[in-house]
Amino acid sequence: MRRLWLIFAQTVTVGLAVLFVVSTLKPEWLGKRPLVGASVVALQESAIPTPASAVATSFREAAKKALPSVVHIFTSQKIKTRRHPLLDDPVFRHFFGDGAEGDNPRTSGLGSGVIVSPSGYILTNFHVVEAADQIEIALSDGRNLNARLVGSDPESDLAVLQITEQNGKELILPAITLGKMESVVVGDVALAIGNPFGVGQTVTMGIISALGRSHLGINAFENFIQTDAAINPGNSGGALVDSQGNLIGINTAIYSRSGGSLGIGFAIPISIARNVMEQIIQTGSVTRGWIGVEAQEISVDLAESFGLPDTNGALIAGVLRGSPADAGGIKPGDILLAVDGRPVKDPQGMLDLIASQKPGDTVTFKLRRQNNVLDTMVRIGKRAPQRRERERE
């Protein structure tokens, strides 16, 4: 019995010694990673390194797929100048010419656009083609084609162009594949494609930094994708694509104090751009709901003074006389809580919800008036287009 116990003890000792040597010198044999240093807290470390094949080392396929669909847009505009009376004098014109070149000086601009349909429809920014009387499109294959403005929406800063047929020939155009916004999350890789500074077609890479950016003072309706992919002047109207080369946004603006990229760029989500584009193609304009109120944000101090449980909602600061809101019984001092059953978070959210309603429909508005919560029915009116002057990249 004593001999068996001695053999057991020696076996355990040798086994522990072997385990100690292996765990020290070859920890991978045991499925463990070697310790870099002693940790003062419990840490969770990956036991299996990520296979090299799972790490994307190139986005050449995404770029190859999207590049042919991104175009350069060249615009020109006549400058209105006062004609000198001498230009109408026959003697002056006999000696100095008719001044034709000086009569019509022009300004030019450039930007980018995205072919979204084989029919020649192009999405771009409104500020790229604003006031232009001539629009020329340069395709990635070197062709230069004329385009017409189908329609625009200054409040979302979007415009739709269409390439016109050349000599009656049917055009074969490389339309981009549209992505789905519901599959886009913060941290996804994003590629920005455009014509920065007019140097030519350029691809930059970054990630999706944030979604749903608003309160930036750029557009009346804001719900931007934020990205750190380099966007510079000339990128306006270009494509923001995912790692598969699918269009997820239209590059629109940058945050910059120097005029160059600081890693904060904004793009209009394709879900919004598609809705605006389809309305423009169908009717030539974008129709939005309106009720005629002025709202302000509910601060913490206002919430305390009104005895509110939180700062959600929009405080109605003014109601236009004779407006749909006035007819529906909405009064200054009311707090708008929901539109058609959808909660209102702040004045921007209120504006978006009302704008999404169809003019002529009667919708339920939930209000807080003093200590009471009540519902009222409002017949939605049509919002008149509004334009705001702002700086762009």
Image (cartoon, rainbow, N blue to C red):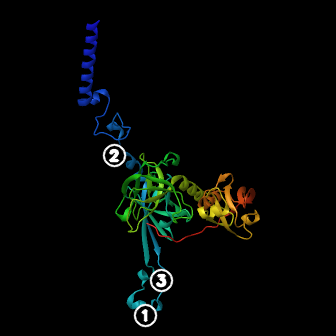
Q: Label 2: how many residues lie within 10 Å, few (<14), some (14-19) or many (20+)?
A: few
Q: Label 3: how many residues lie within 10 Å, few (<14), some (14-19) or many (20+)?
A: few
> What is the quadrant of the C terminus in the image?
bottom left
Quarter of the view holding residue 193:
bottom left
Viewer-nearest of labels 2 and 3? 2
Task: State which tag comes first along the sequence, 2 or 1.
Answer: 2
> What is the quadrant of the N terminus in the image?
top left
Give the total of numbered labels: 3
Q: Amino acid at mark 2?
A: Ser
> As drawn, is 3 to the left or to the right of 184?
left
Viewer-nearest of labels 3 and 1? 3
Q: Secondary structure at mark 2?
A: loop
The x and y percentages for residue 70 are: 42, 56
Asked whether 27 or 134 is in front, the reply is 27
Query: Which residue appears farthest toward the bottom when viewing the image?
Result: 91
Residue at mark 3: 81
Q: Amino acid at mark 1?
A: Val
Residue drawn at 42 percent across, 45 percent down: 244
Quarter of the view holding residue 151:
bottom right
Residue at mark 2: 58
Residue at mark 1: 91
Query: Which residue appears farthest toward the top when viewing the image?
Result: 1
Q: Is residue 164 visible?
A: no
Q: Is residue 279 visible?
A: yes
